[in-house]
Image (tube, helix red, strand yellow):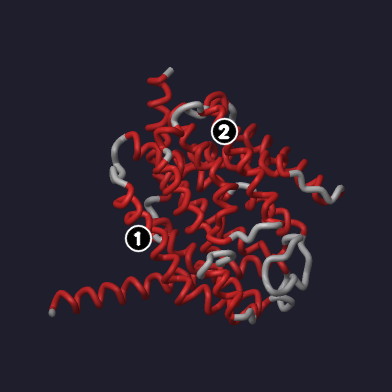
Amino acid sequence: MEQENVSRRMNFLPYLDFVKALLMLFVVLYHCMALWMRGGWFNQPPQEENLFLQMGAEWFKTFHTWCFTLIAGYIFCYQKCENKLPSNFSAFFIKKAKRLLLPYIIVSACWAAPIYKFFYQCSWKDLCRNFILAKAPSQLWFLIMLFLLFLLFFLGYFFLRKNMQILLVFFAALFYVGTVSFKTIPNYFQILMVLRYALFFYLGMCFYLKGVGFLDSLSSVKLLLMDFAVFGIYQGMDIFLHKNFVLLELAVNVAGAVSAFIILVRLSGKLLPKLKRFKLFRYVIKNNFYIYLLHQQIIFFVITFLNGRVPSLVLALCNFVFSMAVSLGMIFLLQRLHALLGRGVKRK
């Protein structure tokens, strides 16, 4: 059984970077449709309601970042087991700070915070709360949350490998605490999101160490139907009874994350060799992180100019096309500028 688990782990690993890139693109798709969500998303409501876009956004919300966190835990555990991470905390801290904190600071200061101020006309105090204290820093919240998860799991790694069933219950309890605490505790430095997402990071570790069990024997269709069933119950409770049970929210997020993890790995094995032949595809996958950093503010501009002027489906499509095209254009120009500056330094 252990040998079988090792074999399955190695089959998953070659596709996980691609799956992470897909999930980042799903976040972009979610933000393109988020305007139509019931709770609102931007500084204005949609001028034309659309149930398809509303449900699409609600569905993407149940798995995109949750599955990404699960995969982050899976890869973290692999790297820990194979001694591919720094052995001391300070070196690990610096490595993750360069990867997650540095982009957060640069993009917040130069892009996300100024545009947030422009559209929301918030006070400087609220702007500092949202970005310096990371209470609600637009799409960049995920970087802070993931950074803190990496640090916590690095420190507690060897303890977390024992008593896994008990710890899964413990992390589920943390999800509950993090969710209900939003009403009373400010989410500074994304601490409440850390509580909510810790279970999924740990679930990724469990999947690496123990395998996915019977879930791997289920067809992708059955996994998708299971996810849709839980999602339907969750949405029905919210729409018709106006109740949102935390445990049901946990169930829909776990079902979504686990189903997406297995299905996307399977799809990657079939599609990746074919898609790699396209240069644009390779460029998008290579730069998906930077697309994530830039896309949301572009969507703000598109919504401001087109909301009410075009049909809802056209607006959602424009959100995606313009956010992708402008993000990729900015990335290309910044990379060229970086290359030119690098050459200038070398000549000196």
The answer to the question of whether label 2 and label 1 lie on touching residues, with beta carbons closer than 8 A, is no
Image quadrant holding the C terminus, namely bottom left
Q: Amino acid at mark 1?
A: Lys
**Residue ID for mark 1:** 98
Could you say whether the residue bearing mark 1 is in a helix, strand or loop? helix
State left or right for residue 90 relative to residue 311. Answer: left
**Between residues 287 and 87, which one lies in front from this camera angle?**
87
Q: CA distance from mark 2 to mark 1?
A: 30 Å
**Residue ID for mark 2:** 168
State left or right for residue 37 relative to residue 289. Answer: right
Could you say whether the residue bearing mark 2 is in a helix, strand or loop? helix
Query: Which quadrant of the structure image shows residue 224?
Result: top right
Q: Who's the residue at 46% across and 27% down the image?
A: 162
User: Is 72 above or below relative to 189?
Assistant: above
State left or right for residue 271 relative to residue 307. Answer: left
Q: Percent position (x, y) of residue 240?
A: 86, 49
- Point out the residue furthest to the right here: 241
| Disc with the residue nearer the chain's start (2 vs 1) | 1
Query: Which quadrant of the structure image shows residue 35?
Result: bottom right
Q: Percent position (x, y) of residue 177?
A: 65, 46
Q: Residues within 10 Å of mark 2 (few under 14, many from 20)?
A: some
Q: Who's the residue at 69% across and 74% down the image?
A: 43
User: Is 14 above or below relative to 96?
Assistant: above
Image quadrant holding the N terminus, namely top left
- Point out the residue furthest to the left here: 348
Q: Amino acid at mark 2?
A: Leu
Q: Residues within 10 Å of mark 1 (few under 14, many from 20)?
A: few
**Between residues 218 and 195, which one lies in front from this camera angle?**
195
Q: Percent position (x, y) of residue 13?
A: 39, 38
